Amino acid sequence: MTAGNSAGGPLRPVTLLIAALGGEGGGVLTDWIVRAAMAEGFPVQSTSIPGVAQRTGATTYYIEILPVKTADLAGRTPVLALYPAPGNIDVMVASELLEAGRAMELGFVSPERTTLIASTHRIYSIAEKSAMADGIYDGARVRKAAPELAKRPVLFDFQALARNTGSVINAVLLGAIAGLDQLPISAAALEQAIRDTGIAVESNLAGFSAGAACVRGEAAAPAAPAEPERSWARRRLSVKELLGIVESAFPPEAHAVLQEGIRRLADYQGPRYARLYLERLGDVLAADREAGAAGSGFALTRETARHLALWMSYEDVIRVAELKSRRARFDRVRTEVAAKPDEPVQITEFLKPGVEEVAALLPPGLGRRLLAWADRKGLRDRLHLPLRIRSDTVLGFLRLWLLAHMKWWRRFSHRFAEEQALIERWRAALTAMAREDYELALEIAACAKLLKGYGETHRRGRGNFLRIFEARIAPALAGAREAGAAETLRQAREAALADPEGAALNALMPEPGTASGAGVEARAAAE
Amino acid sequence: MERSFAQEVAKLQLGAGEDFHGEGILAITKALLQSGVSYVGGYQGAPVSHLMDVMADARDVLDDMGIHFEACANEAAAAAMCAASINYPMRGAVVWKSTVGTNVASDALSNLASAGVKGGTLVILGEDYGEGASIIQERTHAFAMKSQMWLLDPRPHQPKIVELVEKGFELSEVSNTPVMVEFRIRACHMHGNFACKDNRRPLVSRKQVLENPDFDYDRICLPPATYAQEKHKIEHRYPAAVAFIRENGLNEVFDGGLKDVGIILQGGLYNSVLRALEQLGLADSFGNARIPIYVLNVTYPLVPDELEAFCADKRAVLVVEEGQPDYLEQAINAVLRRAEIGTTVVGKDVLPMAGEYVADVLLGGLAKFVEGSLPTGLDVAGITAEPDRVAALKARAAELLGVPIPKRPPGFCTGCPERPVFSAIRLVEKEIGKVHIAADIGCHTFSTLPPFNLGNSVLGYGLGLASAAAVGPAMDKRVISIMGDGGLWHNGLASGVAGAVFNQTDSVLIIMNNGYTSATGQQFIPSTGKNFRMEPTGMTIRRALEGIGVKWLKTVTTYKVGEMVRTLKDAMTTEEPGLKVIIAESECQLAKQRRLKPWVRKQLKAGKRVVRTRFGVDDEVCTGDHSCIRLSGCPSLTIKPNPDPLRTDPIAHVDQSCVGCGLCGAVADAAVLCPSFYKAEIVQNPTRFDLFLDGWRRRVIGALQGAA
């Protein structure tokens, strides 16, 4: 029954290590196990390194249980360790996927001994969260390593199970421990420990049963939460003809992304605008075909279609007002904040359009003049119109609704003209390059990734895009293409997304006067 | 201390023969009561805060026995409290985190150790070395040696720990010397059991008061008495201690069959060494090792004749001593050299000089020692099989994972009131450029970690402002110093504020006023407004600063990021000379939630109207740049895979743990980030008017929205 004591070997304690995050109840889980071991008369010892903060720090709890009852030891006292020893853990409990990976890294999961009980849900670390693009650790690495490193890997979304049973993860994990029967303690004693503690007994017992049933294979896996639908999925859009063109003129590999793009743009600015999207992609597809890229699944067409749809549906005040005023959005807010059907939900929006957002909506000439004035006065990033809109009230909602209904005007606006011009430049570049250097064309397409966000984020992204375009793409188009140009461009794009201050990009593509040390020299000179 | 420790207090009252079950630090607390202490004091800090918390909650028990308990202003005050034991036969104990607390206490400790004590005096130290440590890595050992105080390092076995605490008082009295007892973090949190004795009433106490104060010039720390005291240390106290340790068998010898080798270890490391020996096949689970072991439950002073006897028949001994420098190894070498014993002393050559002795470090070191010392009667071939297996396992795991697992540095809690201050500093820096930030000790030290990365130096508790003194004049912009309310009352008021006002320092200080020493578990401090007996104190930070003479003094609610930014810019640019102080005020969110949650539950149950606030991010509006996260780092502000099939970057997302502090909205507003954030106020138990209004609004809005 107990993993640590195969028949004939010397008597040794069963070891259990719990890796949790602060606030997940790892301490309570430990208490339950210790309590149960004591109730059944087994020598037990636990210790911990509690994490410092509530939610972020990783914490570990370590328990040793001698699988022979004190009464049968004839007065002998075991010496139990305070430190988990790598390669010597019988049960490794990880309350989150990366913590399971960390346990592996530290040698606490071994094929000879370890039953690994790990929840597969993710709580992202600060490095993953604060990346400027996609910094998420590839959890598949941990899942793939588990079967080789653990004697018995039990990976499951215990967090979802806890949520579905109205319980908390530590109770579910206790159930899983009981269900796997790797400790000398009986499942009944573990369950009794929950009762004896006397806190949230009902919900903890529900979680316990679910966890135990789950690892015994008695219960079905909880259904993954449904994907939220796009708010325009509910709108009736006259795009049938366009979708027909996609079917007939574009390769199947690109259908999904094109269909999504068409719906998005028809929603954004009407079917005519969606047609422009298809026309723009026609040239790209032709270039793709010429480059003989059918083998690569028309990567250039697909990636361009993806970025183009996002770029053409750039976020301006009108779009934000539209997205925020939709019924589907109101429904989503209610779900997200877990409001009951009859509970009123008051929603406050934080809008703060600045000079750029206002100029974006003016006619081109006027918009340019406003921006030029703001630049002269140094007000471009200083002048804002802070709006706190209560969109659940009639008057507040009306403000959003009216803004959203200014959509027809967008075609005549300054920003529309600017974006379309830049789109054409980008599209011409990647189409032209497709025939010469397909990899480079793909990288040019990917540079559109830099254009996102609002306010300063958008300004920074657009600045980086233009800077990279002038320094890396324009020369290549003019015929000065070097070997490895695609790689050089990729590096520049990644550098632009490495840090918001632009340090990595500056290091890669120094601008005149920004070389390191220049500041100090300048100051020294001034003195 | 908004929490209740009633269960723990009950355990302190167990009587003779009853079985205690609980954490190590609580066992130590019980041992103090069994030893007849007259007073207990200290300053909170992991891993010994629990002792202070439980004592504060046990005031009825203490009052009944006449024991004086004090939550001291700092460790120096706690150490000074021990003065009671200099003149009178009063047993007492003080507690703090070492080595930082010991540093603060040093002045009083040196004087105490010089004067010597009549009543047994114990200094309980929570050692914070290695994994999970939050402080500089140093050893307490040096303090014991330089001031000549005895240092106990008990084997982590609760009955032994309790016995050594009790014996420690006797040792202190017999040798007129204060005794330090160090407990590592895992030992403090170790759950175990021991058979209790009855609590002992103190000889002298609030209930057994003294009538005549003692005057004895020999106990005053002033020459010429100090010369006599120094001599007394060597001529009387030291030999008395060595004799007591030997006669009472405080150190332990565990025999083993391989008699020509041995292990000498610090008591605290006994269990770890035993486990490593077991892994090497050289011990069983009951402490029966094949190699003889000499356990130093007292690491200072050493007992030379015990050492000589242990080593006399051995070719080689291994000294297992955590941390540096290798005081014990050097001392043992000296003892053996003087006794002309030729035993080879192995130690830091097979074990690392620095760092914690975790399981596989000891395993590797012990294997090397056995392999090199060739004990007679043992085949050492294959002795490294186990460490090799462990190393291979780790290497394979690293290979399979391919990329290291991202670290999880500690950060501010969900809704922490200190986070907005650092968001504000980041925003101010955007405008005026990088600023030198003199950080301090407390939760706010987390500002030095991602995502803020703010703080250029950390010099000690309450020393933020003092540490800016020489940097300030050398900088083209004013320096910002940080200080917590805990640090302010600990010493910062004098060492920082008074010093800066006195020297007319042109500098900016932000004081985080969250009401408690939050990092150590929300203990009360003068500005909390009440003490642990719940008596109102009427002390405020503002009045203290005004009293000292701070002229430029602003109080800002931390969550108002915009106002904080303006105030900070004002402080950085104003023409006014001297110290500019901003009191950044908002209660510790942990303490607040602990109080609020049960109250809200009660209100809801009673059918009362309660508005719950949550923040959220609009999936379709967020473009996945994560600036908001870089300016906040709130655990509840996280990311999720982008539901948009055309986008690949994860989007921001506020999870269920959100407490609705409002920072996301305030930052998005102050930094002009993006319009994705919304605030939702959910009206629970709505009134009929609420429902009427909501129904009307929903109908009108619904009509405008149409089908989509």
Image: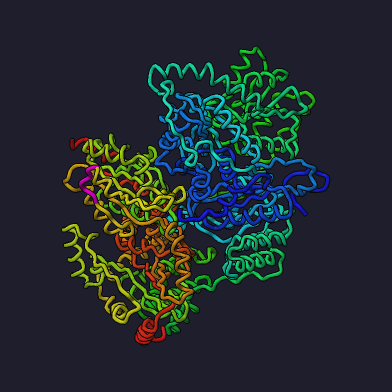
Whole-percent x, y for residue A48 in the image = 58, 47
Side of B506 where A394 appears, left or right: right
Residue B333 picture quarter: top right
- Residue B549 magenta-highlighted: yes
* Whether residue B536 is visible: yes
Q: Could you say which quadrant of the image residue B509 lies in?
A: top left
Give the magenta-colored segment's residue range: B548-553
- In the figure, A196 relative to B169: above or below? below
Residue B575 vs residue B477, the one in the foreground: B575
Question: B40 or B372: which is nearer to us?
Answer: B40
Tell me which colouring the rendered structure shows: rainbow
Left or right: where B160 falls relative to B109? right
**Between residues B591 and B678, which one lies in front from this camera angle?**
B591
Left or right: where B388 falls relative to A251: right
Q: Is residue B461 above or below residue A25?
A: above
In the drawing, does residue A185 fall left or right of residue B213? right
Residue A443 drawn at (x, y percent): 43, 58
